[in-house]
Amino acid sequence: MPVDMLVLAYHLEADTMPIFTADEWAKGMKKLEVDSTEKLKIKMPILVEKLKDPQDFKEFYRYIFMFAKDSEQKCMPIEAGLLPAIDLAQSCKHNSACAMIQTVMKDRAHEKRFVEFLEAKKPVKVINKDQWYNFLDFSDTVAEDLSNYDGASSAWPVLLDEYVEWRTEESS
């Protein structure tokens, strides 16, 4: 799902991916002060631009976890569903944590390497909320080269410690 659609879902406060209910649409458009397709096209780049603010991005990022995972699950699968996508709803329903990280965190620190780690090492089958939330903090505070990572005094989820260990072993 393109990041623009995720941004729109966030501002509509949509509950289920990829469905926008009539009520979510009406309330969201009113909140955005948009009453036409043309106005929405003008508004979208502004909404995407707002994500450059760290607090706005953090709220958006946290929303994505709840929006992208199956509503009956507490976690998001690492890999996409095994069934072939028949339509958009089927495709979005089987979005994976890796796909969401690549879409939402595009070009941010650790995005590519963390997804590579998840796909290559398969340390877990799902990402839980704590791991998802902490990955953003990790990518915002730990340098891409891991030079300021302090495993002794940090309290990252084990998954992130394993990622650092994998990166360290790989560079040795």
Image (cartoon, helix red, strand yellow):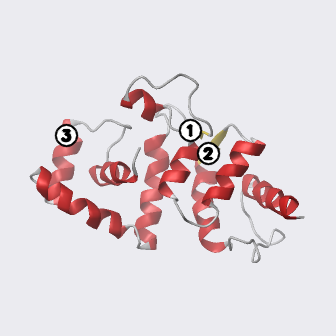
Q: Can I make out residue 31 in this image?
A: no
Front-most of residues 72 and 94:
94
Residue 142 position, x and y percent, is 68, 72
Task: Work out whether mark 1 precedes mark 3 in sequence or the reverse, and give the earlier one.
Answer: 3
The residue pinned by badge 1 equals 74
Label 2 crowd (10 A; few <14 / some 14-19 / many >=20): some
The answer to whether the residue labelled 2 contacts the one labelled 1, judged by CB atoms less than 8 Å apart, is yes
The residue pinned by badge 2 equals 128
The amino acid pointed to by label 2 is: Asn
Q: Residue at x 42, y 27 (%)?
A: 90
The residue pinned by badge 3 equals 23
Residue 14 position, x and y percent, is 32, 44
* Quarter placement of the C terminus: bottom right
In the rendered view, does 109 fall on the left or right side of 147? Answer: left
Task: Work out whether mark 2 precedes mark 3 in sequence or the reverse, and give the earlier one.
Answer: 3
Residue 58 position, x and y percent, is 47, 64
Look at the numbered disc 3 and give the secondary structure of its residue.
helix
